[in-house]
Amino acid sequence: MIPYYNPHYYLWDLVKTIFCKDADEKLRQKFREITDKRYILICSSCRSALYLAYKALGKTGTVHTSPLTCKVALMPIIAAGNMICFHDVRRDDWTIDPNDIEQGLGGDSIAIQAIHLGGFSCDMPTLKRIADANNLILVEDCAQGFGATFQGTATGKLGDISCFTLTKNLFSLGGGIFATNNKDWYLAAKLEQESFPRESSVKIVYRIVLALLSTSRNNRLCEFLYQLLKRKPVKKAMQDDKDVLIKELKLPARIYAKSCVSRWDKIQRLVKQRKKSAKSLLKDLGVSLEKMQFNPDSESAYTKLFILSNNHSKEIVQNLNQSGVEAMHLEHKHGIYYQNKQLHLQHTILSDTGLSNYNNVHDSVLSLPVDYHGITLIKQLSRYFLS
């Protein structure tokens, strides 16, 4: 199997993680420098950080955001008691269209959630201008944005509250970051998080073992054990998105920060290599500009390599997985080949201006692995994608 994601986490990395000292403060300091924010709260995940962001505001209302994202980016908004208003995406980089937001604001609006997509940054300067002009909070979802810039400004700097994951482009065992310059919001988020239960030791061990196995999936035994661990019993879906999220809110395990800080230099090299591999793969596949994310103002981190397929991506993604190429649609979940449109979720409304670009893109999105780069992948893709 050509894996979609490789954490590059080896036994030596585990040893370094275990013996890492003062990780929490070192991690906070790194994100102070990255985001220009004074107050940094380490969380259990990005979705937890987003939930804390909305709880910290002390009010509820309508949050304006993009529907072209995985569901977990939207659950915190709903779980904190808000409504979601979906707006269209831009035609080039598929991030939220600021012009569409500006035309669709209402009296109950409280925030804009800027969701960076696939490593491409939203137009943060314009979103910041709109938020400030309308007395809205700009919440920056950087789960797929670490390492990206827009007009030279790094993601995380312009949001009133910026939230990161420590996985994806930070290749760590787990965790997230809540960053702000507002002390009241920081203290409110910290107090809310203190009520969360601790992560179970079993779950932490599970994450460690899975990271080690997924790093060595070229080995048949590791691949077998990885697939065995990932095949967890399917649970019945809860009807209420709030219940789904609340069940997963935990205090961050200390090993999450340690696994990030102890490998910080390696992580920066991995981010650079991922950018290089993604650009090289796009060139070798001969993907046209109309089929890829593109914005001349953005330097993408390529947290995910999104392209548009010629046909419905569900079948293509499924065929690629069955043929040994672990491609994805929007949601990165084991055995889930396609994420339905989210326009009919509870507590959501649609912008009056329509979602034409979103509707044109959603069913054709294909996310490809970039850690592996070679003729095998190109042949598989030529069979299902380029033909």
Image: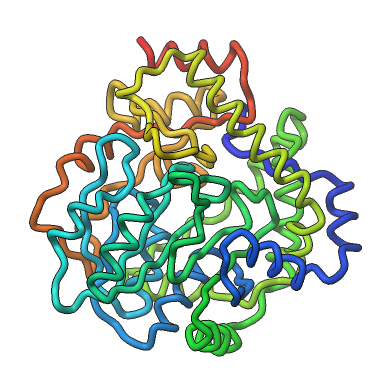
Q: Is residue 370 left or right of residue 115?
A: right
| Number of numbered labels in the structure image | 0
Location of residue 372 (image quadrant):
top right
x%, y% of residue 251?
63, 77
Q: Is residue 15 above or below residue 181?
A: above
Location of residue 34 (image quadrant):
bottom right
Q: Is residue 36 above or below residue 266?
A: below
Q: Residue at x 14, y 72 (%)?
A: 106
x%, y% of residue 321?
50, 29
Q: Residue at x 63, y 30 (%)?
A: 371
Front residue (pair 341, 83): 83
Q: Is residue 344 above or below residue 217?
A: below
Q: Is residue 82 left or right of residue 337?
A: left
x%, y% of residue 382?
44, 11
Location of residue 356 (image quadrant):
top left
Q: Is residue 167 above or below residue 130?
A: above
Q: Residue at x 78, y 63 (%)?
A: 258
Q: Residue at x 40, y 67 (%)?
A: 139
Quadrant for the N terminus in the image? top right
